[in-house]
Structure formats: C-alpha cells, structure tokens
C-alpha cells in the first residue's frame, strides 16, 4: 500500500495478500475485493465509491461429470486478476470481473458491470459496461499526460489516435 491510503476494514472484505495499491487511493465503504489465486493491482490517484466489488477469478465450469461445487481444479484462464491504472474513478456499486484492466484516466459509472478492459480516458457505463464517451479530446489528453507523467510513461499521439478511433 502506498501513501495516503484510505479504506474501511470494518464493513468491507479484502483478500489482503493479493492486493497492491499505489499512492492516493480511497476505497469507499462496503467494498469487496477478492482475488484468491490472482492479483488485484491498483495504481495511484484512484477513487472507489461505496459498494465496489472486484472479483479476480472465476470457477472452472468445464468439468464433465462433476458439479461446479465439486470442481476444485483451476485452469490458467480462471484466475486472470484485475488491474486498475492511475487516475481512475470507479462509481458506486460497480462490479469488475477478472481479466479486466481499467486503463488510466477512466471513469466507470455507478452500477456498471465491467466484463472487459477499458480504453484510457474512457467513460464507461452499463451492464455490460460500454464506452459512451471520452473525458478529453486528443489535444487535451496530450496536455494532461504532459502535466501528470514523465516522458517515458506518456501516451503517444499514435496511441491516443488508436483508442479514440475505436469509438467511431
């Protein structure tokens, strides 16, 4: 856990050994972050509203002749973990499922269920969550990146064009 970390251990559930957080992370009440065999990696400057659930794995549902309850064998694809990059805001009662990366600068709207990774600076809502817009245009993203990140970590104009063109 980095500096300036806030959470409520009394009314939340965490698998502590598999969760890492950067600096300036706030996790609202009634959070459930579970990753038994995988990791939950949270960047810096991340806000979680109340009631957020992150599930870092799933059950193996492919075994013939055994119920899902009886099946204890795991496949690599059953525990893919979750990554939440820097400068992210997750709204109330959002559920994030295993294998998802919430890219830097993203916003996830309240009540959304995130089943696939987001694009940087996207605003996603719904069940399943879908990109509805971007926080900034290309020029604004370039300025934002220059202010917040060292040159080695900044997104390039080409990278920005690539994810912004995806939404058209």
Image (cartoon, helix red, strand yellow):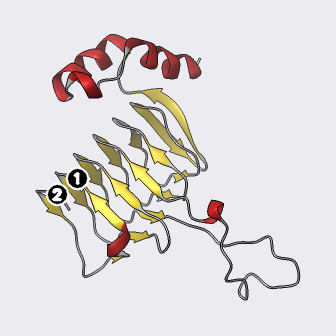
Q: Nearer the viewer, residue 91 or 12?
A: 12
Q: Position of residue 134 (x, y in %)?
A: 42, 26
Q: Farthest residue in the right direction?
A: 65
Q: Earlier in the sequence, mark 2 or mark 1?
A: 2
Q: Nearer the viewer, residue 118 or 78?
A: 78
Q: CA distance from mark 2 to mark 1?
A: 5 Å
Q: Position of residue 69 (x, y in %)?
A: 71, 86
The quadrant of the rendering that contains the C terminus is: top right
- Label 2–label 1 contact, CB within 8 A: yes
Which element type, helix, strand or loop, lies under badge 1?
loop
Q: Residue at x 32, y 11 (%)?
A: 139
Q: Which residue is mark 2?
A: 2
Q: Which residue is mark 1?
A: 22
Q: Residue at x 42, y 51 (%)?
A: 83
Q: Is residue 86 left or right of residue 116?
A: left
Q: Nearer the viewer, residue 17 or 67?
A: 17
Q: Nearer the viewer, residue 73 or 54?
A: 73
Q: Residue at x 56, y 46 (%)?
A: 126
How dense is the environment of label 2, judged by Cα within 10 Å: few (below 14), some, or many (20 and up)? few
Q: Residue at x 33, y 35 (%)?
A: 105
Mark linked to residue 66: none
Q: Is residue 118 above or below residue 32?
A: above
The quadrant of the rendering that contains the N terminus is: bottom left
Q: Position of residue 145 (x, y in %)?
A: 25, 23
Q: Position of residue 26 (x, y in %)?
A: 22, 58
How dense is the environment of label 1, judged by Cα within 10 Å: few (below 14), some, or many (20 and up)? some
């Amino acid at each position: 856990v980095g500096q300036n970390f806030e959470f409520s251990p009394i009314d939340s559930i965490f698998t502590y050994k598999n969760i890492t957080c950067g600096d300036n992370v706030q996790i609202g009440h009634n959070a459930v972050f579970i990753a038994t065999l995988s990791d939950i990696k949270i960047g810096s400057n991340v806000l979680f509203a109340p009631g957020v659930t992150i599930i870092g794995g799933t059950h193996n549902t492919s075994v013939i002749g055994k119920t899902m309850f009886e099946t204890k064998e795991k496949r690599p694809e059953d525990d893919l973990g979750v990554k939440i990059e820097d400068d992210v805001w997750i709204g109330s009662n959002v559920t994030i499922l295993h294998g998802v990366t919430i890219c830097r600068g993203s916003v996830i709207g309240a009540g959304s269920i995130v089943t696939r990774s987001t694009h940087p600076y996207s605003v996603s809502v719904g069940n399943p969550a879908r990109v509805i817009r971007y926080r900034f245009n290309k020029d604004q993203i370039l300025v934002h990146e220059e202010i917040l990140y060292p040159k080695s970590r900044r997104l390039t104009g080409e990278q920005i064009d690539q994810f912004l063109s995806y939404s058209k």
